[in-house]
Structure formats: C-alpha cells, structure tokens
Image (cartoon, rainbow, N blue to C red):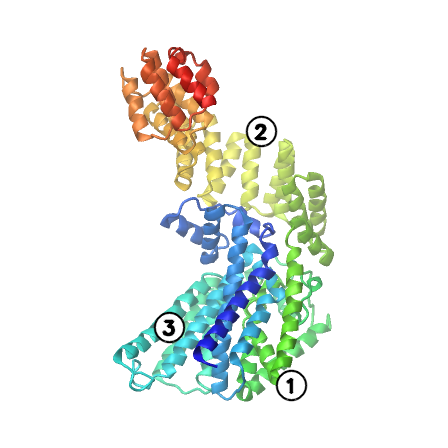
Amino acid sequence: MGVSSRSLCQWIMILVLGLTGGIIYSNTLNSPFVLDDYPFILEDRNIHLRQINVEGLVDAAVHGFPPRRWLPNLSFALNYYAGQINVKGYHWVNIGIHVLNGLVLFFFFQITLSLAAASGFSTHHNRMISFFAALLWLVHPVATQSVTYICQRMTSMAALFYMLSLLMYAHARTLQRSIPRGNLGADPHPGSPPSKQRASRLWVILLFLGCALCSLAAMVTKENAGMLPVFILLYEWFFFQDLKIKWSYPKIIGVGITGICFVLVGLAYLGVNPIHRILQGYAHREFTLLERVMTEWRVVIYYLSLMFFAMPGRLNLDHDYPLSESLIHPFSTLIALSAILGLAAVLKYAARKDRLLSFCILWFLGNLVIESTIIGIEIIFEHRTYLPLMMLFLLGAVLLFRHMPNTRSAVAVVSACVIIFSFWTYQRNSQWQNDVVLSEDIISKSPYKARGYANLGLSYLNRGIYEKALLNFYHALSIFPRLPQVYNNIGVIHDKHGRYPDAILWYKKALAVDPANVFAHYNLGLALIHMDETDEGISHLLWVAQKIPHDVNVRIHLGNALSRQGRYAEAMVHYQAARRVEPDNEDILNNIGNTHVQLGNMTEAIRYYALALDKNPKLKSAQRNLEAVINGPRNGLKEGDPYRSLHELVDVYPRVGFLYYLMARLSSRQNDPTSGLKWLKKAAENGYDNWDQIRTEPDLEPIRNMDEFRKWIQSRIN
C-alpha cells in the first residue's frame, strides 16, 4: 500500500470516528439540565458571563463551582455567553470533547502498539486495531454519563488533556530516541539538510512543552488527573526503559520532577495536612473510611463488568450500592479483593512477557486510585470509568485480533460489538431526554435513596406541578431528613403561593441543616422583605452578597430593599456592583437613575435614563422617569436652555428615539412645529413607536395641525 493510500485510510478512519460519535449522541442535544447541572451551571452566577473580558473570564474560572476546576468552569461560562441556558450548545461541546478523546486515543493507541512491538510485543495491523479499539471505547454506553450529563464535562475534558499530554510525551520520546546521542538536533536520516535537523530539535521541544501545558490543563480540570505524572513515569519505564532502572542524571532529574509534581498536586487538593483532610471528608458520610475502602473493591469489579455488560438496565445515575461492613459481609467483598489481587499478580507476571497487557491492567487500577480508595466521596459513579477503561479497550482489541483465526473474523466480532454498544448507548441516551423519565429511572433502580425523589420533586417544581413536587420532597425527607436543598425547595413552593410565613419556616429548616446554604439565605431574605421584616431580610442578602459578590440578582434586591428604607447611598453601592457585572442591563441603569434622583443628582439621573434607553429604547419605565425629571423643577438641564441640553443628549445617544420625541415636544411648545416634526420623524426612525401618545399628547397639537404631519402619519400607517 502506497503512502497516499495509507494516508487516505487513516483519514477515513478519523472521519468514521467523528461521524459515529456525533450520530450516537445526536439524540441528546435537547436533553435538559439535571441534578448537579443546577448548582454547577444554572445557579452559579459566577459563570454567567455577559461580556468577554479578562476580568469576567478569570472570575468565571476561579470563582466558579466547584473550585479548582478552572477550565470546565471557563467552558461553561463561554457556553453561557454564547447561548445562555440553551442546552444544545452545552451538548455540542460535550459531544465534541468526547469525539476528540476518541481521535486522541486512536493516535495514542497506534504509537503505543508500535512501542510495544519494538520492545518485544508483536502484532499486525496496528492502525486497524487502534481504530477498532478507539471506536469500541467511543460508542460504549458507560461513557454516556460523562457525555450526556452536562456537568460531567469535567471528566471528559480532564481525560482529553490527560491523553493529549501522554500522546505528546510518547511522540517526543519516540522522536528523541531516534536522534543519535549527544546531538539532539542531529538528523536521524543521514544526508538530510541542516534545516531538517533544526526541525527535529524544535519538534522535540514543542512536544515536551505541549505535554507540560496539557498536564497543567488536566490538573485544573479535575482532581483525578493527579495520577498523570505517575503514569508519564510508568509509560517511560514500560515502553522506553524496557522495565529497567538505569540511573543517570537526566533520569534522576526526571523522577525528581515527577515526584515534586505529584506532591504539589496532593498539597493543592488535600492541603498541608492530608490525613486530617481525608478524615474530615467522612464527617457527614453514612460510611466510614474502612467501609468505603472495602466497598470500593466490589465497585472496581463492577466497573470492570460494565465493560462487557453495559446494557441500559445496569446503568444508573445514582446507584444504591450496599456497603461492605467486613471482608465477608457481604462475601462478595472477599471475592472482589481476591480478583483485584489476581489482576495485580497478572500485572506483575506479564510485565516482562507481555508488557502491554501488564500496562493496561495497571492503567485501569491506577487511574481509579484517587476516586476509588480512601477519599471520602460518593461510593460509585459510572463517569469514573471514563479514563480507566480506555486502555482496556486497546487490550481487548489486541487479544481479539491475536486469537481469532483471521483478521476478517476479528473485524466481524468487533463490528458486532460496536453495533450492540451503539444501540445500548442510543437507548440509554433516550432516558436522558426528559428529566422526569431520568429521575423515575433512578427511583426504579434505587428506590431506597432519597436523591431520586428529591430530583423528581425538583423536576415537577420546575414544571409548576407543585402537588407532585411536594409528595416527592416529603418522600425524600422520610428517607434522609438532612437534605437542605429539599427544605429550601419546599419553601419555594410556599413562596410561589404567597404563603411567606410557611416559606420562612422551611428556609430556616434548610439553614438548620446547612447554615451556609446560599439559596436558603437568599430565599429567606426575600421572604422576610415581603413580610416587612426588611432589616433581617437585608442581613441575609448581605451574607449572600459576601459569598457571591458577582450575583446580579442579589445586588438588585439589596438595592431595592435599601431604597425602600431611604438608604439611597447604600442602595447605590449595590446597583453599581450589579452594573459592573452586567453593564448593559437596562433595568440596573434605570434603577441607578432613580437612585440619583433621590440623591438630588439630576444630571446623572438623566444620563443613566438615557443609557437605559440606549440599551432598550422601548423601556417604558425609563421613558417615564426621564420625562418626569426633564419636566421637573430640578431637572439638571442647563438653566434657561433645555433645548440645548437635550440636543447634547441626542448627540451622545443618537439611537434613543425617545430623546427625539422629547425634542419634538419641546420644539412644539416653543412654537416651532416645523422643527418639531423633523424631530418626531427622527424619533420614529430610531425606534419610537408610541403612536397613541403622538396622537394624544397636548404638547404636539401644533405639529398635528400641519398637513405635512397628516401625510407623514398616513404613510406610516399604510
């Protein structure tokens, strides 16, 4: 096969991977936000980006929730900027990341197979095996939770940077190894020109730099990327050092840098006292550290079983996984531990004879260390398999092609698996198309967990079906009474019905469980203000403003409450804080204008009303306020020359049709209907369309008596 034919074959494989990934996830584009999408995206004001600027991007990345996951937070902010809460944009990005992961795996598998062959492992058709391995992983239904669940972009994005870093490292080391020792820039092909030597040197440097940058990106995407420095070192040892330890200064430095990176990652995630931090994670858990560790042995084997049997009936967004209380309770705990020790034995035994087999097992177990050992997080989530299962698909494809009678048979078996997995994935994704259906699926599989009922109640709450929402909320609390968000949501239902005393009671219950619950403080503050307990309500809103300083709604409500108390200077502080976040929000600008009126700053009031109308020419409240100030005794216009002052405003805000309308009225009052009609026409040209007011306003009577006006108004109507 010629070079061009091989290149065409590779491009066809890339195209198939991209199209397949897009097709099997095409039924997720309208899947709604669910579960953690609410606190991470819908309710996190920090990522609600309105303008593209450095400050806004940094705030979204650093202050978004969860902390230290900067790049996912930034990507959610850009999604919000592009389409607000239109789910399609978020899903397109998630699908794109998943497809990119498949493509990166395709290339990484190829280079890994070539390295394995070079170190004693031989296999044919590396490209074909890599393609089918990447395709199997791409269409596998266990990935749905990492792709269709919008907030789990954190998982797929971390995996993307993780694999890109390893791919660049493998390429850099392969190229570096082909260059004669002592001359990094030497040409591996004798007789090549000096320019090619410089290109070789430059490529090695750029690839190592790319590896470092992708490593850093993975670290600030999700915590499970903390194993990346270790696996770069292991990859080097398995495929470039032939599992031998030959110490030299460069290797000592490399190992030292890797160790330092691993320690720094640990300190960043766990602090200077990691033991205390880990134990603290169990303070509010229903399991102990020992119970979690033993349970995770069974979970790891369950994850492994999903690689082979991942039909939708086995997939669950919120598993109710029974705890292991001892090695023999349940007895499957001991069986799972034995299986893991058996895998470890195979790993060690196969290291010399079949290092690809050994590395793939090590990859699976090692990449589960952070999320499936001692850290006190939830017991089981399918998205945790996204990265660990990758290399097992390569191993499966290699073993299949090795042991099948011929290539055609292997291709047939893999193709059948691809079809089955694709069907299961498409079928599972259909359950994500409706949040009620998804919650009911959780309840059917985990009937004794409170979260499914809480989520179903929230779905009904968002649909305005309050009776069903309350039934599910009460059921959730009967299973687990320490759910602050459920108390808060019950309060919201009472709030929507105007039952503020009842709402206040439920918000306070939420705060009794979680004193730092931002939503309960916010809702309680508003309910108290409705009950004229304004001072206490303001205190809760101020607490929220300290926690979320960029939340526009909190600032506006604070400004409104303080204004009603006559505390206009304090109100101005919060309105201006809101404006810094959303400088084009016409309601905020209008409120600032109102506050300037109360403070006696009429010139500033007029400016802000004009700004508000510049953003929204049809904002009636700003029109009324501007007109009232201009016609008032302290209008801020130049004394004795309001015409000139209004003219200056028109020059500054030429798109505000209402200003031209005011100029028309002023000209008419000054017995200059001809100029007034010109201004009126400009008002209409710039969006002013209150024709009833034009027909009835007494000041415009001289203009309406003009024949030219009648012709103009008739042409506008026709």
N-term mark: 3 or 2:
3
Q: Is residue 606 visible?
A: yes
The local secondary structure at tag 3 comes to helix
Per the image, the residue denoted by label 3 is 208
The residue that appears at 53% across and 87% down in the rendered structure is 122
Per the image, the residue denoted by label 2 is 531
Question: What amino acid type is highlighted by mark number 1?
Answer: Pro
How packed is label 2: few (under 14 Cα within 10 Å), some, or many (20 or more)? few
N-term mark: 3 or 1:
3
The residue that appears at 36% across and 70% down in the rendered structure is 209
Question: What amino acid type is highlighted by mark number 2?
Answer: Met
How packed is label 3: few (under 14 Cα within 10 Å), some, or many (20 or more)? some
The residue that appears at 42% across and 40% down in the rendered structure is 582
Nearer to us of marks 3 and 1 is 1
N-term mark: 2 or 1:
1
Per the image, the residue denoted by label 1 is 405
Q: Would you place residue 287 above or below residue 247 in this image?
A: above
Q: Is residue 663 visible?
A: no
644 relative to 389 in the view: left or right: left
Q: Quadrant of residue 306?
A: bottom right
The local secondary structure at tag 1 comes to loop
Residue 124 in percent (x, y) is at: 54, 84
Measure how far apart labels 2 and 1 are at the Cα level: 79 Å
Question: What amino acid type is highlighted by mark number 3?
Answer: Phe
